Amino acid sequence: MRVAVAGFQHETNTFVSAPTTIDDFDGHSVLGGIQYGCQVIDMVKDSPFATAGFIDELQSGNIGEAIEIVPLLWCFAEPGGPITKDAFNHILNAILNGLRSDRPIDAIYLDLHGAMVIDCQEDGDGEILQAVRAEVGQNTPIITSLDLHGNVSKKMIKHATAMVAYRTYPHIDMRETGRRAARLLHKTITYDRKPAKSFRQLSFLIPLHRQATVIEPCKSIYRLIEEIEADDEEVYSLSFLPGFPLSDIHDCGPSVIAYGASPAVAERAVDLIVKEIAARETDFSCDLLTPDEAVAAALREPSGGTIVIADVQDNAGAGGTSDTVWIIDALSRAKVPDAVVGMIYDPEAAALAHSAGEGAEIRVALGGKLMSGHKPYIADFIVEKLADGPFGLTGAMFGGLIVNLGLAAQLRVGGIRIVVVSARTQCLEGAYFRHVGIEPFDHQIVVVKSTVHYRADFEPHAKLVLEVECPGASIMNPSLVNYMNLRRGVRR
């Protein structure tokens, strides 16, 4: 049996005007660009990605088949604005051409995100699935894994044989999700028929920072999902996707998908979860502190231990610029004696620091360049430490992965130390600080530009976590977002 494998991932924030181009998937990707053929295996084998788990499960012998993996392509671009039509077609055509040249193909696995938007089409993932289905016909199984932030459409449901989504945010179960996808493929092959499916969209939007599965209400909802699967072997797979609310499209919002031995089984499983989510709607409230409130609260805490302040609305992982300096302004106004900030995306400042060298004092207009109405933080900084090139991540989410942020620097002004980088990505673990010589948990206040993923590595070491509402491109409160294309009846 020959199983084709491909990954094409992007979480699109439609409120970001700058488009996502082919360079964002290739030359500018912190993961090393588009991988083709055997490069896919080399890239994912030690990674946390769902593709790695899918391949692991197929090769484990648990499936009971002699299976040949046919790797086609794998790529990722940092969340941002809609993908250009040229970039989308370039990558999709590479996948389709791979399917044509590697025939026969008995099944296909697609590692997608679920919230991809093209500048000419709002349902990018649906377009991928439709094109692949047209290429391989109706009888070839297409199994798909999704990020739990996916905005699932009827087109996606129609063309995929089955889809499974992550169950953790921070996403520490990506690899396990791939394994579940492989087991679902096995069921499809074993019973020689497509599993029955049920799909439901909910009628309210959930703020991103309230989708964390380590806190309520999502913690209990996902526990119930596992209980339903464990109690009924006829429920093959059950997924709840809270959705990606920064996407102004018809299908934006939460959804539930079930696959089972019969339509009645799948429908019953969906009913149980939808009922639980609907009952918890008011628990998804959007409570955030202002920058000054967060800093004041941190300073009121008794000495000892680290306080984490999450700048949740400047998260590159949701399309943020990662260059806003509102929180740095607040730290400076309060004359905070000991704080570290990660990360400010400013290639010009990083290059200036490298030109000056470690120990130099430089005048820098830091950040504040990419968001309309914002201004840089201008000060004299000491260049404490410089770094360049690839380094390894060590946290629970991406441990073992090699990333490259280009020229990087630790800049200090007073008691504030700032990690400045040349590649835009969110600060989801301590390795980003250590790369420029900072041990984050040796400091009183740690500021991270991340919405939820930081919790996997930072929260276990923190005595207090504060979420702050600095202006940014990743707006948390859906009621403050100017939607134009939501389907009728969706509350925000």
Image (cartoon, rainbow, N blue to C red):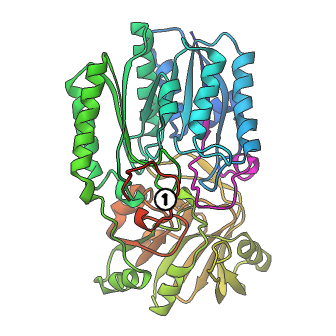
Residue nearer the viewer, 411 or 488: 488
Range of residues picked out in magenta:
7-30
Q: Residue furthest right?
A: 355
Which residue is identified by label 1?
Answer: 429
Q: Residue at x 33, y 82 (%)?
A: 297
x, y percent for residue 420: 64, 71
Say if residue 53 shows up in the picture.
Answer: no
Instruction: Determine the residue positioned at 53% across, 8% down.
Output: 66
Viewer-closest of 421 and 161: 161
Residue 401, x across and y down, in percent: 57, 46
Please state which of residues 446 and 92 is positioned toward the viewer in this rendering.
92
Placement of 414 over or under 449, stated as above or below: below
Which residue is painted at 44% across and 68% down in the image?
480
- Residue 137 lies, with reference to residue 29, above or below; the image says above
Give the quadrant of residue 240.
top left
Dot 1 alpha-carbon crowd within 10 angstroms: few under 14, some 14 to 19, many 20 or more: many
Image quadrant in which the N terminus is located: top right
As helix, strand or loop, the secondary structure at mark 1 comes to loop
Horizontally, is 388 left or right of 63 in the view? Answer: right
Name the amino acid type tagged 1: Glu
- Residue 219 appears anywhere in the view: yes
- Up the image or down, 227 lies above or below 79; here it is above
